[in-house]
Amino acid sequence: MESLFEQQGYQIIQDRLDKLSPDQPAKWGKMDVAQMLHHCQKAFEIPLGISTIKPPGGLMKLAFKVFKKTLYNDKPWGKGMRTAPEFLVKDAKVYETEKSRLLELAAQFHEKGKDHNWPIHPAFGKLTSEQWGKMQYKHLDHHLRQFGV
């Protein structure tokens, strides 16, 4: 699995984002491309300390623990995965604004790098820098595949 901390993985994601267009149709899911770009920002806001999500409780805590290994392994995520309520995007978004903000957040994450002291994830717990980098790459890969790039 590529990592957003490695220049190659970071460049691959930037190149794929450049191939998106505002009217790009989704292969699955309910979000349009601008909503997807906004959704992807949320995953960067957590490690960058901009926002957080409510930690899971009870059975969801166990489910997150089981799911954790799939965050950074080499197997792509499937369609229709559930997301945290804080990551749901239902209102209309402006494509260029959302794309610009996502690129900005990805750059901040990449620049902090693998030697940064990353926070504990509110749902998945302690992640190594390697896991953070691969997870962010994999999340973006999942949604870029959703829109055919």
Image (cartoon, helix red, strand yellow):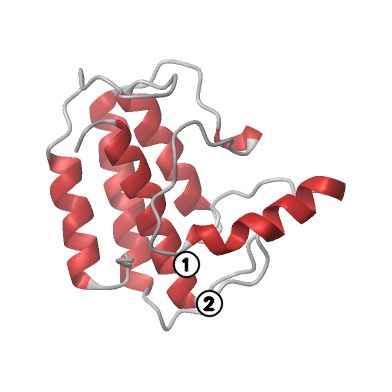
Give the quadrant of residue 148. Answer: top left
* Marks 1/2: CA–CA distance: 6 Å
Write down the quadrant of residue 101 in the picture.
top left
Residue sitting at 64 percent across and 68 percent down?
A: 120
Q: Is residue 57 left or right of residue 88?
A: right
Secondary structure of the residue carrying numbered label 2: loop
Q: Position of residue 83 (x, y in %)?
A: 58, 37
Residue flagged by tag 2: what amino acid is it? Thr
Classed neighbour count for the residue bearing mark 2: other residues with Cα under 10 Å, few (<14), some (14–19), many (≥20): some
Task: Judge by depth and name the residue closer to the eye, 149 or 55.
Answer: 149
**Would you say the residues marked 1 and 2 are in contact, meaning their CB atoms lie under 8 Å apart?**
yes
x%, y% of residue 89? 50, 25
Q: Is residue 59 left or right of residue 15?
A: right
What residue do we see at 25% from left, 19% from top? 25
Q: Secondary structure at mark 1?
A: helix
Q: Which mark is residue 132?
A: 1
For the N terminus, give its image quadrant: bottom left
Q: Which residue is mark 2?
A: 128
Instruction: Pick out the residue farthest to the bottom.
Output: 115
User: Looking at the picture, how far across and down is residue 12, in whole percent?
Assistant: 17, 57
Q: Is residue 48 visible?
A: no
Residue 62 horizontal side relative to residue 104, left or right? right
Q: Quadrant of the C terminus?
A: top left
